[in-house]
Amino acid sequence: MDAFKNWVARSGMGSVLILALVIMVVFPLTMDIFRLNLVGKYLSYAFVAVGLVMLWGYGGILSLGQGVFFGLGGYMMAMFLKLEASDPITTKIQSTPGIPDFMDWNQLTALPLWWEPFRHLPLALIAVVAVPMILAFIISFAMFKRRVGGVYFAIITQAVALILTVLIVGQQGYTGGVNGITDLRTMLGWDIRDDSAKYILYFANCVLLLAVILLCRWIQMSKLGTLLLAMRDKEDRVRFSGYDVAMFKVFVFVLAAGISAVGGAMFTLQVGFMSPSLVGIVPSIEMVILAAVGGRMSLVGAVYGALLVNAGKTYFSEAAPDLWLFLMAALFIGVVLVFPNGLAGLYESHVKPWLARRKAPKASTQAVEPPAAPLSSPSHKSAPSAPLPGGVQGQSA
Amino acid sequence: MSNTDFVLAIEDLTVSFDGFKAIDALTLYVDRGELRVIIGPNGAGKTTLLDLICGKTRASSGSIKFKNQEMTKVQEHKIVRAGIGRKFQTPSIYENLSVFKNLEVSFPRGRSVLGALGFRCTDEVKDRVQSVATEIGLADTLDTEAGLLSHGQKQWLEIGMLLMQEPELLMLDEPIAGMSVRERELTGELLQRICKGRSVIVIEHDMDFVKRIAHKVTVMHQGKILAEGSMEKVQSDPKVIDVYLGH
C-alpha cells in the first residue's frame, strides 16, 4: 500500500486520477447531453494542449501550427464518414451519385484516387495518425537537422498552417473548400448523431485522452523526458554529450502531431463536421493559449486549461458577442502577466503549500537549509533563482 | 597525412571567417596520457581550436585525426561518441535538474531516441554516478538542483559530466575561471587524477596553475603556434616573452 502511495506521489498519478474522476464521473452526472457534448468538443482540443506541453513545455519548441495536425486528423476521419454518408441511394439526385455532395457541386464525376483508401475504416484510422505524423516528420527533420529553431521555427509552422488552409479552401472539389466536410452521419452504420452515440464518443474521448496523458507521463519520466528538459536548458551541452539533438526534437514534434491528430478525429466524430476554420493560424494560436493557461509544464493542467478557456469562449460569445474576442485576449494577457506558469503553476505555488499547512499543522517546520557544501566558497553569481516549477523535483503530471 | 601513435594529430589546420584566419596552418600532436595546456593572448584562437576539434566549427582545410580517424567531416555527436569530451568556457550544466540527473544524463548509454525511452537507471549507473560525484567532491549534493551550486561546483559538475562518458580525450576551456584559491588547488589535483589513462587539453590563463599541472605547454598567437615545450622552455622563449608574457 505504501509502495503504491509512493508511486502515486512520485509519478503525479494523483492528479490524473482526479482528472479522470472529474471528466468521467462528475461531468456526465451533472450535465445534460448537449453540455456534455460541448465538453467533449473542448476535450478534443485538450489533446493538442497535452501535445504542446510535451513539445513546448518540455521540449522548448513553440509551434504555432498545431491546428495543421489537429485538422489533418479531423479531415482524415471526416473523409471516411463522408464517403459512408454518400452512398448511391442517398445521393441519387446528384449528377454523379455515390460521391460526396461537394464533389458533385464542383463538377467532379468520379472519386479522386486518393480518396479511395478512406472507404475502409482501418485504413482511415491509420491515416488519421500516420499522415499528420509523416508530415510532422518531414517538416521537423528538414528544420531541426538544419538547426532552425526558436522564433524561426514558430514562423515556419505558422506558414504551414496558412498553406494548408489556402490549399483546403482552394481545392474545393476535393476538400469541401471553406465549408469543410459536413453532414456526417454514421460510422459503419452506427449513427453518431444520437444521444447514446454521443455518450459513447464522449467516454471514448476521455479514455483516449487519459491514455495519452499516461503515455506522455511515462515519456517524461524516462531518460528522454530528462533529455528534453536538458535540451531546453543547454542544447549544446546535450549535443556535446553525444546526443543527436535534432532527432529528439523530431521525436517530440512528431509525438505532439500524432496526439493532436487523435484530438482532431475525436472532434470530427463528436461535432459532426470538419472545416478549414480549425486548421489555420488563429485556431493554432488558440491551442497554444490553452496550454499556456493550463500551465505548459503540466499535462493535467493543459486539460483544465482547454476546458476553462473554451468554456469561457462559449460563455463570452453568448453573453457578449461583440466583446468576446477582446475578453479572450484579456484572459490570455492576464494569465501571462499574473501567473505565467498557468493554472498548474498557481496550484503548485499557492494551493499545494496551503494544503500542506492544513494537513500537518502540528508537524514542526522542517529545516530547509541546504547542507553545507564540503568545499564551499563564497557563491558568486550562483543565481539561486527560485526553483522553477519546470524542475524535475516536485513535478506533477 | 601519415598515421601516427598520437591520440590527436592536427595537421595543417586552417579556418577562416570571411578571410580572417582564426586558425592558420596549425599543426599539433597530443600524446596518449598527456596533459597539454594551451596558452596565448586573447584572440589567439584557443577556443576556436577546441571548437574545431569537437566539430562545433568546421575547418576550411587541413586534418584532425583522433586515433588515426579523420574527424573534420564527422557530426558532433559522433565525435563525442568516438571519445572526445569538451567542457565549455562558461559552466554548461542543466540548471533545472538535480546533480544526480545531470550526471545520469551524461552516462553513455541510451543515446538514441528509442534507447533513451528504454533506458533504466540500473545499479551500475548509480554506482558510476556515485563514484564520479565523489571524484568531483559533489557526493553530498546529489539531490541539489544544479542551478543552486556555487560557480566552482558548477565547473566541477561539468567536468564530472564529461568523466561519466569516459572520454579518451578531454578538452577543458578555462576550468578554473572564477574559482577561489582553494578551489583552484582542488581542481589542479582533480586534473592530475583524471589525466591518468586519458589525454587532456586545457586552455588556461593562470600561469601559476599552468606551471603546476602542465606536462607540455603550447603557446598560440594569431592562429599559429608560437612555441611548444616545457613551461620553463616556453617562458624563456624570446618570441613568447615578446607577445605574451613580457608586459
Image: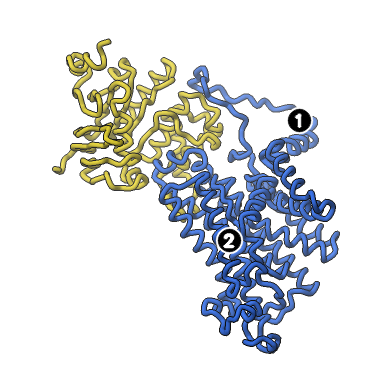
Q: Which chain carries label 2?
A: A
Chain B colour is yellow
Q: Which is more foreground, mark 2 or mark 1?
A: 2
Q: Is mark 1 on a helix, strand or loop?
A: loop
Give the crowd class for mark 1: few <14, some 14-19, many >=20 residues within 10 Å: few
Residue A274 position, x and y percent, is 66, 67
The residue at which mark 1 appears reads as: A363
Numbered circles on residues, count = 2
The residue at the point 46 percent across, 60 percent down is A138
Can residue A4 be seen in this snapshot? no
Can residue A362 be seen in this snapshot? yes
Q: What residue type is labelled 1?
A: Ala
The residue at which mark 2 appears reads as: A69
- Comparing A377 with A172, the one in front is A172
Q: In this view, does A336 lie above or below A88?
A: above
> Gap between marks 2 and 1, in whole Å?
50 Å
The image quadrant of residue B45 is: top left
Q: Is residue A87 left or right of residue A312?
A: left
The residue at the point 74 percent across, 42 percent down is A330
Q: In this view, does A359 lie above or below A318?
A: above
Chain seen in blue: A
